[in-house]
Amino acid sequence: MRRTYAPRLFTAGADPSGDAECQGVLNPERGVFHFRDLRSLGSVAGLRDEGYTLIYGQALIDDYRARDIDQPLIDQLNESFAAVRSAGLKVLPRFYYATDIGEDDAPLGRVLSHIDQLKPVLEANADVIAVLHPGFVGAWGEWHSSTNDLTRPESRKQIFDALLQALPASRMTLARRPSHKLEAYGGPLTEETAFSGAPLSRVGHLNDCFLASEDDEGTYQLPGEKAYAAADSAFTPVGGETCGRNPPRSECASALAELSAHHFSFINTDYHPDVLDDWRSGGCFETIACRLGYRFVVMEHESSEQIARGQPLPLRLRVFNDGYARAYNPRPVYLVLQQGEARRVVQVDADPRRWAPGEESEMCLEAQIPADLPPGDYQLGLWLPDASERLRDDPRYAIRLSSGAAWDGASGVNLLHAAVRVVE
C-alpha cells in the first residue's frame, strides 16, 4: 500500500502559517518561549494553552557568590522543574551571579564547584531540560564583562568542560559567541561528527542580540565567525532573543533569512517587544513561530498489505523537514500497530536528529511483527515519544507530524493512512 502527499511547504514557496497544521502543533524542545524565574516560578500551568512548550528559566544565584550551593536551593530548583514537568513544558535554564555590567560574578574555583554541586539537579531533571544556557560568566550570565577574568579562553574551556561533565550525555549546552566554541573544541560540525557525544557535538549557539547590529552586538567579532556559526548550527540547538530594533536588518526579510541560515530552534517572545511587534506588523511572526526548530511532514509511505506473525514488516517512509532546524535531543521512533483500543509498538532504526531542515529523508524501516500478535487488521502509526522513561508515555512530549498522519492526542501516536493484515 502506497500513499503520497503534496503538503503546503514553506521551502516550496507556500505559506501554511495560518493553517491548523501550524497553529495547532505544539511540539517539544522548539518554538517561541516565555521568560520565567526558577527561584520564583509562579504558575506555568496555562502556557501550553497559549502556544508554548518552552520557558527560559533564569536562576540568579548572587547570594551564593561566596558559599556552596545548599539544600534549600536544590529543593527550590527541584520543585520548579517538577512544576515544569507537570505543565508539559521544557526549560532552558541559566544560572548566573550578576544583573548588571560591573557587578561581581564569582571566581573560577567557585563557579566550577557550583556546577559540580548542581550536577545532581541537572541529572535528575534532564528530562525537562531542553538545553542548558552556559550562564555563570559576567552580567546576566552572557559571557562578557566578568569581574573575575572568566572570559579568558582557558577559563571558558574549564567552564564548558564542567558543564558538559555535569549534564547527562544526552544533553547539550550553548556558546554565547561562536568563537568560544571554536577555541574550546574546534569544528564546525559535519554530518560525520554530529551527535557523536564528543564535546564538539554537545555545544550549540546562543544569540542574545539577534539582528540588533551588523555583528549582533558583538556576537560575531572575528573573521569567519558568522560563517562558522551557520555551518555548525546545522547540527546543534540554536536560539536566543532580539535586543533592540535595527531596521532594516531587524525586520522580516533579514529575520527570515537569518533564522533559516542559522537554524534557529527557539526564540524569546518577551524581548525585545519592539522587534517582535515589527515582525507581527510585517507579517512574518506566524511563519517564524511555525518554522522554528523542526517541522516534519510526511511526503510518502509504502508498506505491505499483509504480513505473517513473526515476520519483518518493511515501511518505506519519506519525511520532509520544513522547519529551520533539526531535532537536537535523542528520541526513539516506534512503528505502531493499532486495532481498536489495543496497540503494539515496535522500535525501528531511525534517528529524527538526522532529518535535516530543507531536505527530504527517505527511510526503509523494518519492524519485527510480534509472534504473539493476534491475527487481524491493524492501522499503522508512528510514535516519536520522549527518550526519558518518565516522559515516554506523556503525549505532550511526543512529536506530532505536521501533515500526512492523524494525531491521536491521547496517546501521542501519528496514525498513518495505512493498514496491514496480520495472518498466521
Image (cartoon, rainbow, N blue to C red):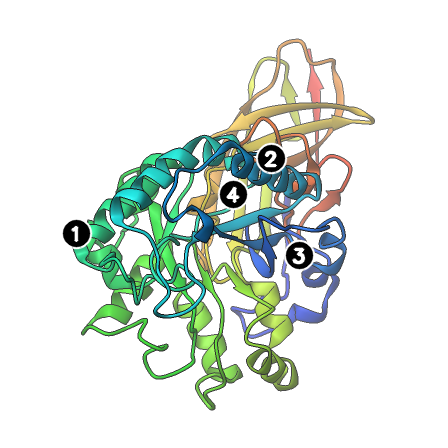
In the image shown, does 136 or 266 lie closer to the viewer? Answer: 136
- When asked about the image quadrant of residue 388, the answer is top right
Q: Which residue is mark 1?
A: 154
In the image shown, does 56 or 78 lie closer to the viewer? Answer: 78
The amino acid type found where label 1 is placed reads Glu
**How far, Cα to Cα, is label 2 from label 4?**
36 Å
Query: Would residue 282 be seen by someone viewing this image from the given angle?
Result: yes
Image x and y of residue 111, in percent:
32, 45
Whichever of callouts 4 and 3 sits on the residue coming sooner in the sequence is: 3
Secondary structure beneath dot 2 equals strand
The amino acid type found where label 2 is placed reads Ser
Secondary structure beneath dot 4 equals loop
Horizontal relation, residue 397 to residue 73: left or right: right
Whichever of callouts 1 and 3 sits on the residue coming sooner in the sequence is: 3
Assign the N terminus to one quadrant of the image. top right
Image x and y of residue 52, in percent:
66, 56
Q: Which residue is mark 4?
A: 129
| CB under 8 Å between discs 2 and 4 | no
Q: Which residue is mark 2?
A: 303
Whichever of callouts 3 and 2 sits on the residue coming sooner in the sequence is: 3
**How far, Cα to Cα, is label 4 from label 3?**
15 Å
Secondary structure beneath dot 3 equals loop
Assign the C terminus to one quadrant of the image. top right
The amino acid type found where label 4 is placed reads Ile
| CB under 8 Å between discs 1 and 3 | no
Mark 2 or mark 4: which is in front? Answer: 4
Count neighbours of disc 4 (C-alpha within 10 A) and say few if under 14, some if 14 to 19, many if 20 or more.
many
Residue at point 36%, 46% (across, down) = 66
Whichever of callouts 1 and 4 sits on the residue coming sooner in the sequence is: 4
| CB under 8 Å between discs 1 and 2 | no
